[in-house]
Amino acid sequence: MFTDLQCEVVKFTATCPRGLEGLLARELQALGAIGLQEQPAAVHFCGSVALAYRCCLWSRLANRILMRLDQVRIGSAEDLYRAVATLPWEQHLQPSGNLWLHFSGTNREIRNSQFGAQKTKDAIVDRLRRQTGERPNIVKHHPDLTVALRLQRDKLDIAIDLSGDSLHKRGYRTQIGAAPLKENLAAALLLRARWPQIAAEGGALLDPMCGSGTILIEAALMAADIAPGLLRERFGFENWLNHQSDIWHTLRAEALQRRAVGLGKELPEIRGYDGDVRVLSAAEANIARAGLEGRVRVRCRPVVAFKVPSHKVVKPGLVLTNPPYGERLGEQEALRETYAELGRQLKGEFPGWQVGIFTGNPELGYSTGLRSHRHYQLYNGSIPSQLLLFQIHPLSERGKAADRACKLSAEAQMVANRLRKNLRTTGKWADRKGIDCYRLYDADLPEYSAAVDLYRTCGGTLYVHLQEYRPPVTIDEGKARNRLRDLLRAVQSVLDLPQANISIKERRRQSHKSGQTGGGQYQKHAEAGTALRVKEYGAELEVDLWRYLDTGLFLDHRPVRKYLRESASGKTFLNLFCYTASATVQAALGGCVQSTSVDMSRTYQSWAARNFRMNHLDPYRHQLVEADCLQWLASAQQNRKGQYDLIFLDPPTFSNSVKMHRVLDIHRDHVALIHQCMMLLAPGGRLVFSNNLRSFKMDGELGKTYRVKPLQLLDRDFHRNPRIHNVWELSTG
């Protein structure tokens, strides 16, 4: 399509984001480049100056186009100075013009890129001063000439940057949302997802989380054959002394003509959605600046309402999106349900469509419940990311697709075998005992370090809570992700569950109630997700597998709750650090006549109230108190002495919550806490004290004052982890 307008062959380098080298090489070849050589984040090629202009105007993937002036070997700073000073800079820059420098890399002698840039500047300035008697100004913004140098060991490449600003800055995006996707990366996603072919066949493009509209605009530029550089105000070559303005004007005129032809045709449906009306305002402004009003449309709509547009017949095409993926644990957990909801909408509303999800957290991609048939490793800035590609099969083909998805790798099959074995043993034990919620797997295979908990609802539906323990720093992150994927596939295969019934979480090994510290273990994680009702020894309890790191029901404390229930008949009961008060519910159903449950979290107090209502507990007899337990205990010494027959004390290991008036450290403070609780016991009363610190040791002095009895309260499903909690019973007798 292109013909060279200047025949001199020059060496160039096109830089790009990592992972795009192969795509960029093919693009440059289509533009007319020859002699292509790929290297990390760059492609070397040869061609004319006209080709370089064409690449600046038409490349959708490159960051910069560099014209190489020389490549030399240097050792010292003086070598650098001489190599730069020998080049005829007076042929490239007006002596009084504006100059800027990019210097990257070091060697044994030049250990600082800033120092390398300074020596380069000195060499160019001195050369021009000697040749002309004048010197250039050093200006960062809109210089007449930008010189780019790259030093790798002793090899120095010296080049002129023909681009100016990075080519990913097309000129249409003046407003951006949070964590924007660079334009050339968005273009790469579209190419990997075969958008040009889909568009040529009339297929639509939809983005359910479009943000400021970058994917949509890049898709429209491709579909309408619009050069991505047409909107840029300037390029780096325009004030270069050797600039061929006639060639440039011809190339630009050709691009404008092609744009007019492209926009004269009917484009495929290109539409975006987002739940945030503010970012849609930015998207609309960007679309207008790109000249695509009426060609690209956006609308405020949450993921849960994502459907094929109904205003006209839309041919199945491509759903491509870059959902948020969060860098912190709480953010990631909050997004799992978003991804799961996206998967549900795609499976229900988009049969026959292609789907691409670009994410820096592939685990979230798996939360969609879809099975990718291909993925590409890319980088979003410095973040390793993946483009996951899916095919949404028509309903008639889904059975075959499910059969293919069930084929497990050898590693996943090994995990599946262990899960089946545990179902034959632990599962049968739970069935005999009438236990609906239990731990099926707890890092049984060391390389698959996670816990798999089963929750069967009152209605009989099975759900899984999969908690991945944080892998050691010695384990490669990619390998850890693959292992989680194997475990997830094994769970789905063995239990025959849809992805929507599986909650996946990553967590550190830590005290299981330390979240009450305000440090974040029990922070809210997702707005969506249905709370479930489960049964335990006849009690109905609410659990939530999605919104919080823990579910509201600590399964390892099941026998502790049973013990309290069996001990509570006719007694008054106090539950400190009560969490969702499931222990109080069991005590009440066991016949306690009055109870008090204390926790400073309003969330847990509300949760506890729902548990009470589900079990028809009288709120006048069973009181919930929102308070700092330490303060409440201190004040209770004045008016509640001898009031309780049974106390359950299950404090966090450590707490520095802003809601507390002082820091709680269980090692340091357990003696004082126990003394205060014992003061509240009625004659013959008992204190059940529990904690989850594996290294915890009870102060020996307590045994001199009270009768201290260790309780072995651990069910079969936690025998692999016998130190998950410690429980003692203390009394004065």
Image: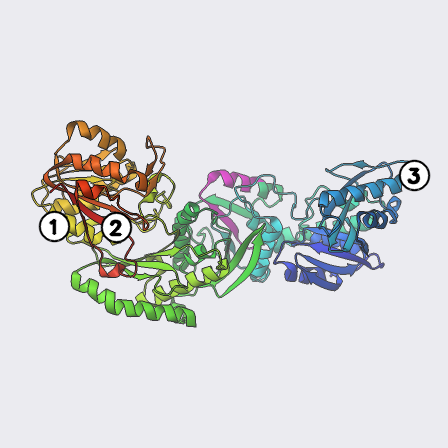
Residue 309: x percent and y percent? 45, 52
Query: Looking at the image, is 485 positioned above or below residue 602?
Result: below
Residue 238 or 567: which is nearer the viewer?
A: 567
> What x and y, as percent, mark residue 614?
18, 45
Q: Where does residue 498 sit, x and y in percent of width and height?
A: 34, 61
Task: Name the foreground residue: 378 vs 624.
Answer: 624
Q: Nearer the viewer, mark 3 or mark 2?
A: 2
At label 2, counting other C-alpha atoms closer than 10 Å, the crowd grade (few under 14, some 14-19, many 20 or more) is many
Marks 1 and 3, the one that precedes in the sequence: 3
| Amino acid at dot 3 | Thr
What is the crowding at mark 3: few (fewer than 14 residues within 10 Å), some, or many (at least 20)?
A: few
| Residue matched to label 2 | 726
Image quadrant where one finds the N terminus: bottom right
Labels 1 and 2: the sequence-earlier one: 1
Q: Which residue is mark 3?
A: 132
The residue positioned farthest toward the top in the image shown = 638
Q: Regarding mark 3 in the picture, which secondary structure is present there? A: helix
